[in-house]
Image: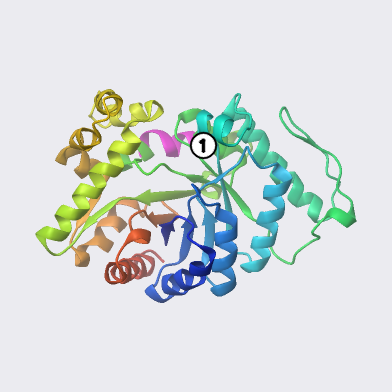
Amino acid sequence: MRVDMMTGPKPLQQMGGLANATKAAGFDGMLFTEGGRTAFPAVTAAALAEPDLHYSTGIAVAFPRSPMISAQVAWELQEATGGNFRLGLGTQVRTHIVRRYGGEFERPGPRLRDYVLAVKACFAGFRGEQLDHHGEFYELTFLNAQWSPGAIDLPDPLVDIAAVNPWMLTMAGEVADGVHVHPIAEPGYIDRHVIPSVAAGAAKTGRSPDEIALIVPVTTIVGDSDEEIARDRAAAKQMLSFYGSTPNYAFIWDEAGFEGTTARIRDKQKAGDFAGMAAEITDDHLATFCTEASWDGLADALTQKYAATTERLVLYNAGNETPERFEKYGTVAQLITAATG
């Protein structure tokens, strides 16, 4: 199991220093989210400063970009990182795609499936094969030598997708190289849905489930004082209430024994009561959806919970920490990597 830190892109001038600090702290890689700033320039700046880390987008928004654009950028980043780049793609939600990006969102699951296959067809085209992708949503048939980046002496970038519901998880097992599991994916959800659905998808295309990496972000509550623990608990409640307001995730809460959590949080959200949203997250929620430990105990706690299922563990909290706590998270990452090989 390898351990990455999660971060949002920052001003590009800061990314090299952050990559240097990430390597020095002991993390295996960096996973970049995408919000107000785009992920690919941040990965580029970080990778040029620290090419030995692993880099991934978690996730880059797919639909506003053509598959060819995503494939070209991934190809160049694979070259820049010496083969250590993973292209993580996701759908986002309708409001963002239609009203913020001006894109199309109809049938997002099948559209993303076609998108992944189109990106992989582009990779083959860069190596000199005929570009001949005819999908339900994307048709790519023209790529001559003048417009191709050309072959690289490295494997194709791995293409991962974000998936939550069983259909998307099955599709990931069918066509993707990895799955970005949701941050509220507690181990029971992984056992009930992620593993069997990915295996079912892999069987459709004659692959082993072991070929599809599970990339799992984890929320930690860690400290050696009551003050540290209290601070992390408060932050975790805010984060969980944010995700808890999404109707598509309601089944995760319900199946974990917290039926109605989403409805209660949404009632508070509609009233503009953001403190009330966080208050709906109880200590029992935290015990299920987070990992709480002392600094000395965190590596063992995470290893016991996730080593059997997870290829890349992502420390959700680490990217926004103080320098002192960031270095402690790096030590935890080193201990996990050493213990799991």
- Could you tell me residue 140's position as x and y percent? 80, 39
Decide: is 127 above or below 117. Answer: below
Q: At 11% from the left edge and 63% from the top edge, which residue is drawn?
A: 225
Q: At 34% from the left edge and 65% from the top edge, which residue is drawn?
A: 336
Q: At 32% from the left edge and 42% from the top edge, which residue is drawn?
A: 187
Decide: is 340 above or below 262. Answer: below
In this orientation, does residue 309 appear?
no
| Secondary structure type for disc 1 | loop
- Could you tell me residue 270's position as x and y percent? 30, 24
Count the marks. 1
Decide: is 223 above or below 162. Answer: below
Query: Closest to the observer: 237 or 255?
Result: 237
- Could you tell me residue 174's position as x and y percent? 59, 37
Q: At 34% from the left edge and 27% from the top edge, which residue is drawn?
A: 250
Mark 1 crowdedness (10 Å alpha carbons): few <14, some 14-19, many ≥20: some
Along the horizontal axis of the image, is 238 left or right of 89? left
Along the horizontal axis of the image, is 25 left or right of 299? right
Q: Is residue 339 magenta?
A: no
In this orientation, does residue 165 appear?
yes
Q: Quadrant of the N terminus?
A: bottom left
User: In terms of image quadrants, where is residue 273?
Assistant: top left
User: In terms of image quadrants, where is residue 297?
Assistant: bottom left
| Three-letter code, disc 1 | Gln
Decide: is 313 above or below 296. Answer: above
Q: Is residue 199 magenta?
A: yes
The residue sitting at the bottom extreme is 24
Q: What secondary structure predominates along the stretch shown in magenta?
A: helix
Along the horizontal axis of the image, is 17 left or right of 221? right
- Could you tell me residue 80's position as x and y percent? 65, 67
Residue at label 1?
92
Range covered by the magenta-colored residues? 191-200
